[in-house]
Each structure stands twice: as C-alpha cells, then as structure tokens.
Amino acid sequence: MRRIKAYVHNNPARVYAFCFAIAAFITRMYPDIPVEAVVVVLLALLGVGDRVQRVEDKKTLEALYKQPPKN
C-alpha cells in the first residue's frame, strides 16, 4: 500500500489522466448511465485536475531552485 501511495504522490498527473480515461471508457461502454452522474464525475475530475496542477507546479518550483548535479 505504501508503494501505491508513493506512486500517486510522485505521479499525480499520470493517475489523473488514467482516471479521466477510465471515466470516458465507462461512459462509452455504458451509455445508459444518467447524464447527471457523468457530469458530476467530470466536474469532480476537473477539481482534482486543479489540485494536480498545483502539485506539479510545486515540484517544478522546487526543481528550479535545486543545484544541478555535477558531472
């Protein structure tokens, strides 16, 4: 379980993209799902996307201020 948490923490954009793809796949496979449920899931994923973007921005800023490794 620790490895999964570490993977999600280190790669939130990949997990987010996977979840969005699964949501699209399920919607395509089961067209009888109510539109309201699909809209709620997509809005929730958009909210998660905002959080993912903030995490990625933080990682980028931290990397910008690190000293590059000496070769």
Image: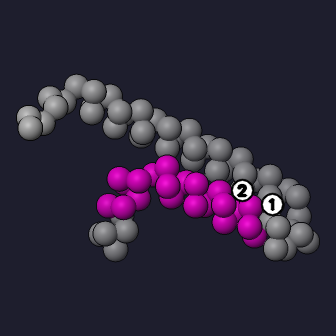
Above or below, 22 against 51 in this view is: below
Task: Identify residue type, mark 1.
Answer: Ala
Give the structural element (helix, strand or loop) at label 2: helix
Q: For mark 2, what is the residue?
A: 41
Residue reaching furthest to the top: 65
Q: For mark 1, what is the residue?
A: 37
> Residues at badges 2 and 1 in contact (C-beta under 8 Å)?
yes
Location of residue 53 in the rendering, given as x and y in whole percent from the top left corner:
50, 38
Q: Residue at x 42, y 40 (%)?
A: 55
Assess disc 1: are there few (<14), some (14-19) or many (≥20) residues with their C-alpha within 10 Å of its C-alpha: few
Task: Identify residue type, mark 2.
Answer: Val
48 sits to left or right of 61: right
Does 54 appear in magenta?
Answer: no
Above or below, 69 against 40 in this view is: above
Location of residue 22 in the rendering, given as x and y in whole percent from the top left corner:
66, 66
Q: Residue at x 27, y 33 (%)?
A: 63
Does 9 appear in magenta?
Answer: yes
Magenta residues (range): 6-26
Residue reaching furthest to the left: 70
Above or below, 28 against 57 in this view is: below
Main secondary structure type of the part rendered in magenta? helix
- The quadrant of the picture occupied by the C terminus is top left
Give the structural element (helix, strand or loop) at label 1: helix
22 sits to left or right of 38: left
- Alpha carbon of mark 2 to alpha carbon of mark 1: how far? 6 Å
- The quadrant of the picture occupied by the N terminus is bottom left
Q: Which quadrant would residue 62 be assigned to in this image?
A: top left
Assess disc 2: are there few (<14), some (14-19) or many (≥20) residues with their C-alpha within 10 Å of its C-alpha: some
68 sits to left or right of 32: left
